[in-house]
Image: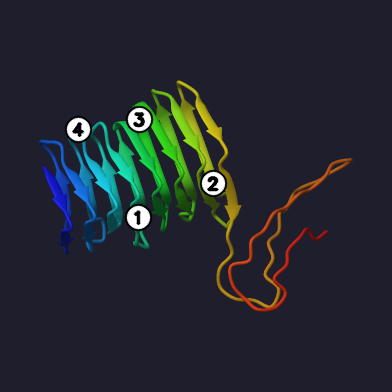
Amino acid sequence: ATLSGSLFWSAAGTAVSVEAQAVSLVRSTAVSEAPDGRALAALSSGTTVDGSYLQGAYAAFAAGSGLRLSGSMLASTTAAQGYALLGSGASDLRASSSTFIGASTAAVALFAHGGLLELSTNTVRAGAAYSILLSTTHGPVWLSSNTVEVPARAGAYGLFLGNINAGATVQQSAFVLRQTGSGTFPWCVRKGTSLADGFVEVKFRPEAGRQDQAGGVVW
């Protein structure tokens, strides 16, 4: 079944639940406003999301096989525990050219994943604790050409890999710290670092402002 150009909204639960057949969500919007709601629950095999917008405490929840995400935006909008993409026991998941916006916990979190996991050319905006959290995977992990925003807080991770049984390949991906808001001279500090006969390199990109669009290392 193909759902194209559609709007799905739920005030108390899941906006779109795929349980028994392959479904393609194309150029559509799914929103759950429930405190623990799911915009999309991909529980069966062969779910495809293309050019769509998903928003909820869990923008997408994956427990089936063969989920495909492309050219889409997934946003978690809860102050409690929430994820842009949460997978538990899913398999063979691929996401490309999509944006994942985390809220309180992680942008992308996948647990007990089987088969291939491929994330390529995505933008991942940090949750409070993790940008990407992968725990107990049983197939190959491939992360390529992603831009990953690192949470700007102590003890947080841009990428956390735990119990990756078949190995992981991470290539051509950028892990960046993004500061928002306003300030006379915004800056960040890396504490507990000691260097001897080494070097420090930093790259930056100003996004707004009219004066002092510069950056560098302070010591």
The numbered mark, 3 or 2, whose residue comes first in the sequence reads 3
Q: For the N terminus, which image quadrant?
A: top left
Kind of residue at disc 2: Gly
The numbered mark, 2 or 1, whose residue comes first in the sequence reads 1
Mark 1, Cα crowd under 10 Å, few <14 / some 14-19 / many 20+, is: many
* Mark 4 element type: loop
Tell me: 211 left or right of 102.
Answer: right
* Mark 1 element type: strand
The residue indicated by pointer 3 is 112
Q: Residue 138 appears at what percent x and percent y? A: 39, 23
In the image, 154 versus 2, the foreground residue is 2
Residue sitting at x 34%, y 47%:
85
Q: CA distance from mark 2 to mark 1?
A: 19 Å
Question: Which one is closest to the eye, mark 2 or mark 1?
Answer: 1
Q: Residue furthest right?
A: 197
Q: CA distance from mark 3 to mark 1?
A: 24 Å
Callout 2–callout 1 Cβ contact below 8 Å: no
The residue indicated by pointer 4 is 45
Callout 3–callout 2 Cβ contact below 8 Å: no
When asked about the image quadrant of residue 135, the answer is top left
Kind of residue at disc 3: Ala
The residue indicated by pointer 2 is 158
Q: Residue 149 appears at what percent x and percent y? A: 53, 53
Question: Which one is closest to the eye, mark 3 or mark 4?
Answer: 4
Q: Residue furthest top?
A: 166
Mark 4, Cα crowd under 10 Å, few <14 / some 14-19 / many 20+, is: many
Residue sitting at x 19%, y 38%:
43
Q: CA distance from mark 4 to mark 2?
A: 29 Å
Residue sitting at x 49%, y 51%:
129
Q: CA distance from mark 3 to mark 4?
A: 16 Å
